[in-house]
Amino acid sequence: MTDTAADPPLDDAEGRPDGRADRSLPGGRVDTWRHPPLVRISHWLNVVAVVVLIMSGLNILLAHPHLYWGVRSTFADPWVSIPPLPDWALIPQGRNLAEARNYHFLFAWIFVANGLVYLVWSLVTGRFRRRIWPTGKEIRGLGASVAEHARFHFPTDDHARAYNVIQKLTYAAMILIVLPMMLVTGLSMSPGFNAVGGTLLEIMGGRQSARTLHFISAALIVGFIVIHVGLVIWTGPFNNMRSMITGWFVIQPPGSTAGPKLGRRRRTDDGDAQ
């Protein structure tokens, strides 16, 4: 099996946007600058906002724990029914629809504002293109990347400087599809927004369809978080957490991996694999 999932960038432009060069460490390791301050701040703001949004959203959902498609709820044949949840999983603790809505709306706008700042900054600085948007070559290596992920093979050497194609596609889908769907479906259910632009609810197929799509978006975000945290732990929790706190990420010696070692293609001087 060849490692084509996380080839290092030929030009480490992302690593030195502010002139911070790599720092040599004992044992052949390298400390590299990975996350600028705005990335780290927006990440931790998102952590807080998403936790509150999920827990307050569950409290709102439990006011009527059934989902439907269409304009109205029939109470007879829900698409899915949500089982009872413990109070510790809710904000506020215990069933309180009015207060849960206050939390949800407040942190929804914090989440949106934070996301917009990050997105605009990423586009203006080129970070989105360099770090998130996959190249044609990376797309062609998607099959190899899937096979390596299935074997829990994750390079921690110089290949870890760049996101692999699965990471890039996942991040791009979350930023460009899932999160906008969460925002649009949430707005379509807002009575205040409907009074200004009521056609959005019709586009969603009715309030119940919008509510269901909002739930699906939330479920996709939760799934992303579970997998993300799991991979952070698998590939080195201390190193990953340190990089998101200080900005510095340790690159291990050549051949290092967080999973079973697989064969890699020998790279020529021009970067093409053989």
Image: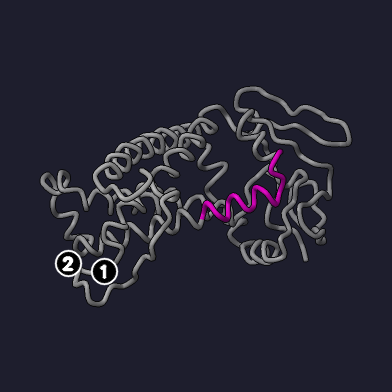
Decide which of 72, 89 is in the foreground and name it.
Answer: 89
Find residue 4 and report its horizontal and vertical position in percent.
71, 58
Decide which of 142, 88 is in the foreground and name it.
Answer: 88
Secondary structure at numbered mark 2 = loop
Decide which of 62, 205 is in the foreground and name it.
Answer: 62
Q: Where does label 2 land, which residue?
A: 72
Question: Residue 15: within the magenta?
Answer: no
Q: Are marks 2 and 1 in contact (CB under 8 Å)?
A: yes
Secondary structure at numbered mark 1 = loop
Dot 1 alpha-carbon crowd within 10 angstroms: few under 14, some 14 to 19, many 20 or more: many
Location of the C terminus by quadrant is: bottom right
Left or right position of 169 against 79? right
Residue at the spot x=45%, y=44% of the render? 51
Location of the N terminus by quadrant is: bottom right
Q: How many marks?
A: 2
Left or right position of 229 against 104? right
Residue at the spot x=17%, y=45% of the render? 193
Q: What residue type is labelled 1?
A: Tyr
Find residue 53 and report its horizontal and vertical position in percent.
38, 45
Mark linked to residue 68: 1
Q: Which amino acid does label 2 sit on?
A: Arg
Q: Start and end of the magenta stretch?
A: 224-238
Q: Determine the residue located farthest toward the right in the rendered image.
A: 27
Q: Determine the residue located farthest toward the bottom in the rendered image.
A: 77
Residue at the spot x=64%, y=37% of the render? 241
Left or right position of 186 against 274? left
